[in-house]
Image (tube, helix red, strand yellow):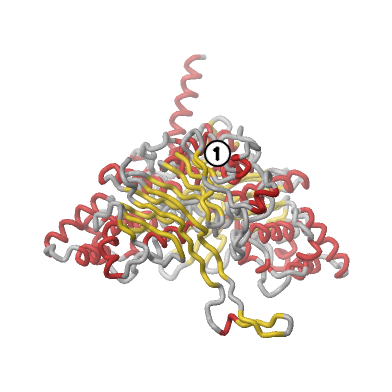
Amino acid sequence: MNLLSVSNLNVNFKMKKQELAALIDVSFTLNRGERIAIVGESGAGKSILGFSIVNLISKPGYIKSGSIKLENKELTKMNLRQLQEIRGKRIAMIFQDPMMTLNPVLTIGDQLVETIRSHTKITYKDARNIAIEKLHNVQIASPETRFDQYPHELSGGMRQRVIIASVLLLNPDIIIADEPTTALDVTIQAEILQLLLAICRDNGVALVLISHDLGVVSKVAERTLVMYAGHIVEEGPTLEIINDPQHPYTQGLLNALPQMTLPGQRLNQIQGSMPSLTERPTGCAFHPRCPYATEKCQQEQPSFIHSGVSSVACFLVEDMVNDFANQDEEDR
Amino acid sequence: MATPLIQISGLEKSFSTNESWLGQWCFRQGKLARHKDSVHALNGVNLTINQGETLCVVGETGCGKSTLARAIMGLTQPTAGEIHYLDQRIDQLNDRQRMFFRRRMQMVFQNPYASLNPRMTVYQTLSEPIAFHQPQLSRIEIDEKIETLLASVGISASSSDSYPHEFSGGQRQRISLARALSVEPDFIVADEPLSALDVSVQAQVLNLMIDKQAERNLSYLFITHDLAVVEHFATRVAVMYLGRVCELAPTKELFSSPKHPYTRALLSAIPRLDSTTAQPIRLIGEVPTPIEKPIGCVFQARCPHANQRCYEELPKMLLQSDSSSVACHAIEEGRI
């Protein structure tokens, strides 16, 4: 049974004059201990997806339809109290900027202890021991002294380690990490990614990594979802997506990376930019930028089809798969 | 060899952390004492930029990359050292004298959302520098110029009356580039011009910069922390750490055989797409704050090869066999 299954999720923003669709028919599943990544450019809806899993969408956004199931519990129907039981304890989140996540006027220790004590009945002393043990687990040197320090006394990498420690306090089943290393330098980023990977492996925690950096994703995730303008356009094993991308957007995204062309040559660019929420095109959202777009793409929304080990939402791939199937029948 | 376009020697810049006179007083052992802390952002930087080349400066946060860019552009006064443009010294000029050089050197900033004036249309943004630096031009000539400029950066001329908020990030960065190009400079300093942009849009802006360089024989000082862009775009690369250049090498040599321990760690830390790359080299600790001027090598605290000499003596930039230069005692002594 899947640990988490999201099906046909639609998230809308209710504005004065119109309703804007941020997520359209998003479905995916996550198994116990699995590491998946959600990739896309800014405005694709990847953070909204991460937030809506724990129902952290604030007004004017709301979940219009669809279901999010944690084992067999439906998360979209829960009230605040039930959700608070889930948040942190079963599903924990790591945000992009560690300075914004930590409270600047409380010591590291106070924040960690508060997290434990709000979910379990435990004495301060026991909670402190757990907190120090977790700080030790995330490789913070001399955790006893760090325990009494304030966030501003720590460096960016150290703060992100503290966040990871705080996420681990309640032994969650799922960690959602929303761009956890974007605010960090490359050398620190490498360390944090290694740490996150080791922690997920050792404790059997499932990870949802939200990132725009395909290099980071390839190091961490087993499976990757590519998002564009509120839709999932391609889903498959990470290696497959990187070595044999099928959706034209994924292809364009990978080809645009500088390492894909010889030094000094022009890069392969995708024309145009991601459409904003107010001006989503009809049909396939990618068709204005797609080099292979046909008339059909302008009118109809392609459905998700299996192609090899990946699933893709694109008419081009659909036609190709159908052609192959027809050919097979003729051969028979 | 031709004279380099820009020559920087022994450039230093320090910022005082307690600027106000009152903030400098503190109690020490019961006595009131005056005390000044300063951050040494640049600690003796030597660089040359040749005509038509792209020099990329890489390094982590706080290593002085941006201060270097600002010092070259004259946006901040260096504490010591000299900057030459061809054969003229430009670091001690007053605003009036600098005007001529402002036309020759332009800058593109990191955040296109902050560097364009929100209350000026694209036309106004582009016409102001042209009219200022070339007052002899007539209105019609300026209009023509702006039209060709906009076309060359791929913005339709019909949108010249639009305001910056009507454009996307990539378009704004192209307008910033058009503004820099409007006075026909031969040298452009670009301070992280791609970091606020998405991958697919990064490619558009980078392509534009490559095209313009081929067209006008521009020289770039390109500051970035994205090493994939560096590998693609740079002629030479300078790796900075705590206000010093620790390795300077042609791009190919730097990426095929990085020498300085910091460069090695930095290159190994890039998350690459192929899964075969080795484990990153772990650096212990984080970049120290440059408040105390370090004695000896700046990288000593995190270097796995540091010995006593590294703590006592500042390493010199030494030319290696493959025309790269490295400042490291361990390499000089043949230990690594």
Image x and y of residue A228, in percent: 47, 48
SS type, badge 1? loop
> What count of labels does the image hold?
1
Q: Amino acid at mark 1?
A: Pro
Does residue A232 appear left or right of residue B261 in this picture?
A: left
Residue displayed at 66% across by 51% down:
B302
* Image quadrant containing the C terminus of chain B: top right
Residue A125 against residue A247 in the figure, above or below: below
Q: Mark 1: few, some, or many residues within 10 Å (few <14, many ≥20)?
A: many
Image x and y of residue B125, in percent: 27, 65
Q: Residue A5 versus residue B185: which sits nearer the camera?
A: B185
Q: Residue A253 versus residue A181: which sits nearer the camera?
A: A181
Residue displayed at 37% across by 36% down:
A265
Residue occupied by mark 1: B258
What is the quadrant of residue A134 in the picture? bottom right
Image x and y of residue A81, in percent: 72, 68
* Image quadrant containing the N terminus of chain B: top left
